[in-house]
Image (cartoon, grey):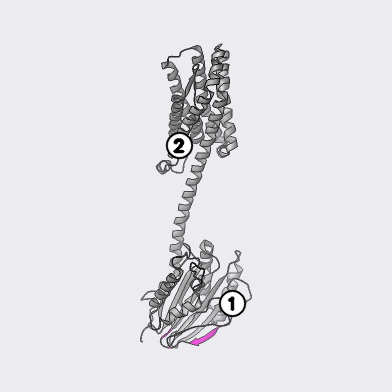
Amino acid sequence: MNDTVAIASTADLSQFFTNMIGTLAVILVIAAFIGGSEHLAKFFGSGKSNWKYAVFFGVLGGLFGIYGTMSGLELNGAIISVRDIGPMFAGFSGGPLGGLIAGVIAGTHRFFVYFLGSNNSLSAQTVTYACVAATICIGVLCGLLSLKIHEKLKKPWLALITGVVMEVFHLSLVLLVGWLFNNFSAALGIVKTIVLPFILVNAIGFTLMIAMISYIEKQRAITLERSRLKTELEIATTIQRSLLPPITETYPGRHEIGLAASMDPAKEVGGDFYDVFFVDKDRLAFVVADVSGKGIPAALFMATSKTTIQNCVRDVPSLAEAAATANESLCSNNSADMFVTAWIGVLDLPTGALTFVCAGHNPPVRISDGKPTFLKIRSGFVFGGMSGVKYREHTIDLKRGDRLFLYTDGVTEAENRGHELFGEERLLACLEQDAGKTPDEILSDVKTAIAAHVDGCEQFDDITMLCISFPGTEP
């Protein structure tokens, strides 16, 4: 008996390795396909502790065990296979119940293979009983381990050790049953022959399966998180748009003024904003501002800045004092150290007198008598950057037919493929051609000019524009 085993050990060791690895590869591919199925994920939802989940993976692990047995190689009544991978996989994924189901299915199949087979020797009987018991126990043990240390089992070194321990337990059970059946020498001979490929392939296979499952779970979690963030960003975009005043034919509803505005964030949400509101029945205030940064933080600070500036302009009679008050308010609750540039104007509709304050913002363009010029003054400091700042207000008179174009730096700093900025000169050239046009037409022409300049390059900064014509229509 020992001589036969020795010959088998020399001749079949390479075949054992090759056959077991091939079977394992098929199981891994199937497991990856099923584990990555979106339909399966939707069926179980987010809960992995329900009985359906355990039963599914128990049955799946049992089928893996049956396939492992059927594709295994026989040696003196023993079937050398990767059967244990199925119950170990089911135990890890479905807990003790899943491991038990897989173990019973695979173990029962293994018993019927012996019962219906032609080899009914004492050696075959010994190994069969041991394998059936080991297969069931391994499924349950892996399930119990998964309950206690599921996340830790995802570590490759711990998964490998677990696989080795389970296969050592399996082979030890073969020796124990062989001793109980007074057939220890035959059991020992089989164990000596298969110990290396049996332990290595099953342990490494279990490790690879755990790594694969963990990777799929991680990718699915990332996908779900991205989907959640996308949904939240879409909601944030809608909310941010709702914060901006609607510029329509009925708003602001005065024939003395014509308005058009647009805000195109570089990301889903941005830090730029514009605002238009009445200070009293004859004075219309308008703001264009740019918050430092982009994305959600800038959008949150944008909402705070817009509300703060509007409240201060409405409540404080002097525009310079209103700007100083807004700055103090933004500085006092600015743990994120963000700031905002702003250009604030208050237009007296009956007279055309425009009072304005600039807080570190780009100078607007005044189009008067068909000629565009920058309304450059000495700018004040940005809002939120430093407390105690004083601001100076300035006043000019708008004439009939004048237009005022306000914008953020996303306009002049739009880059083409050669990193050339759109710049102030191109902006002036564009606006010079727009003399006599409506605010909507002016904004459309500027957007077209920017698009032609960047030539498909990615937008890196928010682009916001506001255009005012005085008067809007004939009184």
Q: Which residue is mark 2?
A: 29
Nearest to the observer: residue 136 or residue 198? 198
Q: Residues within 10 Å of mark 2 (few under 14, many from 20)?
A: few
Nearest to the observer: residue 17 or residue 141? 17
Residue 149 point in image, percent of width and height: 57, 37
Q: Secondary structure at mark 1?
A: helix
Residue name at image x 55 percent, y 26 percent? 197
* Front position among marks 2 and 1: 2
The earlier-in-sequence mark between 2 and 1 is 2
Residue 219's label in the rendered image is none
For the N terminus, give its image quadrant: top right
Where is 470 relative to 249, above or below? Answer: below
Segment colored magenta: 384-402
Where is 194 relative to 439, above or below? Answer: above
- Work out whether residue 244 can be spotted: no
Q: Residues within 10 Å of mark 1 (few under 14, many from 20)?
A: many
Residue 61 point in image, percent of width and height: 46, 31
For the C terminus, give its image quadrant: bottom left
| Amino acid at pointer 1 | Ala
* Magenta portion: prevailing SS class: loop
Q: Is residue 359 magenta?
A: no
Q: Is residue 388 magenta?
A: yes
Nearest to the observer: residue 200 or residue 306? 200
Nearest to the observer: residue 252 or residue 360? 360
Where is 289 relative to 89, above or below? Answer: below
Outermost residue on the front side: it is 11
Residue name at image x 59 percent, y 71 percent? 384
Q: Which residue is mark 1?
A: 324
Q: Secondary structure at mark 2?
A: helix
Residue 145 point in image, percent of width and height: 56, 33
